[in-house]
Image (tube, rainbow, N blue to C red):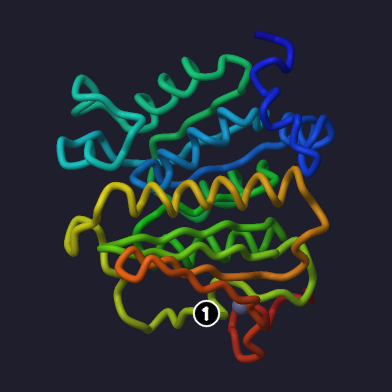
Amino acid sequence: MTDNTRYARQIQLPEFGEQGQAALAASHVLVIGLGGLGCPAAQYLVGAGVGQVTLIDRDVVEATNLHRQGLYAEADIGRRKVDAAAERLRAVNADIEIASQHTRLTEAVLKQSVAAADLVLDCTDNFPSRFAINRACLAARTALVSGAAVGLGGQVGVFRNDIAGTACYRCLFDEAGDAAERCEDAGVLGPVVGVIGTLQALEAIRLLAMPGTDTQSHWLHWDAKTRGSRHHALQRDPHCPEHTSQSA
Ligand SMILES: [Zn+2]
């Protein structure tokens, strides 16, 4: 398919339109982590017509992933996630340029991959990776959509590193703070990560295709127990060490 027929239902939205579709087609999004968050995020971005998507992950598919990681089937157990995900995503939308890297998140990998992208989605599950991704995005002044989900709740942060003076991920979290709870230790319901990963894709589409609505960093907390959510704008922490060497 080379025309825009498949995108008709989103193009008909006045908030999105032909202009939004063209903006997505011209965009390159980096998705780091192809687990419970990265699967729905990548699926919706590829479905929506983001022109280039790069996937980074170092894991293989395991049976315990299948209840929440919808890009994988039973036959994928033992395969690299990036390979199985790229194959599935290309089958969904052959027009998208999909690149993948099966690698650890070294500083060099991050620097190169973030520099090539217009927007980064952090779909990882641990603080060291999140801090490293934040640092790379700050250095490149690239916006970051960060997700986290465990148990029955989750968060989505949008960090406008592309706008001077905004809050970064490190403004919110202390590197010496508590270790992140991880799904493999604490458990999680599949739809909970599905909600958060889908919200990451939604924020990415807003940022790329519906510009001008958000000019600062913001944070959403969503909780399945109360069926409630809280959303607020974020202010830069004047003591955040990540900004001391940055002019922005
Ligand atoms: Zn900061």
* Residue 28 left/right relative to 226: right
Residue 170 to residue 81: above or below: below
Q: Vertically, is 50 above or below 31? A: above
Residue 161 image position (x, y, % from top left): 70, 64
Q: Residue at x 79, y 76 (%)?
A: 247
**Ligand 1 closer than 8 Å to label 1 CB:** yes
Question: Image point 65% across, 8% down: which residue?
Answer: 1
Is 199 or 229 nearer to us in this picture? 229
Q: Quadrant of the C terminus?
A: bottom right
Taking 55 as reference, is 138 above or below it? below
Q: Position of residue 245 (x, y in %)?
A: 69, 79
Query: 66 left or right of 49?
Result: left
Q: For numbered disc 1, what is the local secondary structure?
A: helix
Q: Residue 134 location, x and y as percent?
A: 55, 64
* Left or right position of 205 against 92: right
Residue in front for this viewpoint, 198 or 175: 198
> Where's residue 231, x and y in %?
56, 72
Image point (34%, 46%), residue name:
36
Q: Quadrant of ligand 1?
A: bottom right
Residue 47 sits in quarter? top right
Crowdedness near tag 1: few (<14), some (14–19) or many (≥20) residues, C-alpha within 10 Å: some
Which residue is most to the bottom? 239
Closer to us: 6 or 156: 6
Q: Identify whether 198 is placed above or below 3.
A: below
Per the image, the residue denoted by label 1 is: 172
How many numbered markers are drawn?
Answer: 1
Q: Residue at x 73, y 29 (%)?
A: 25
The kind of residue on which mark 1 rests is: Leu
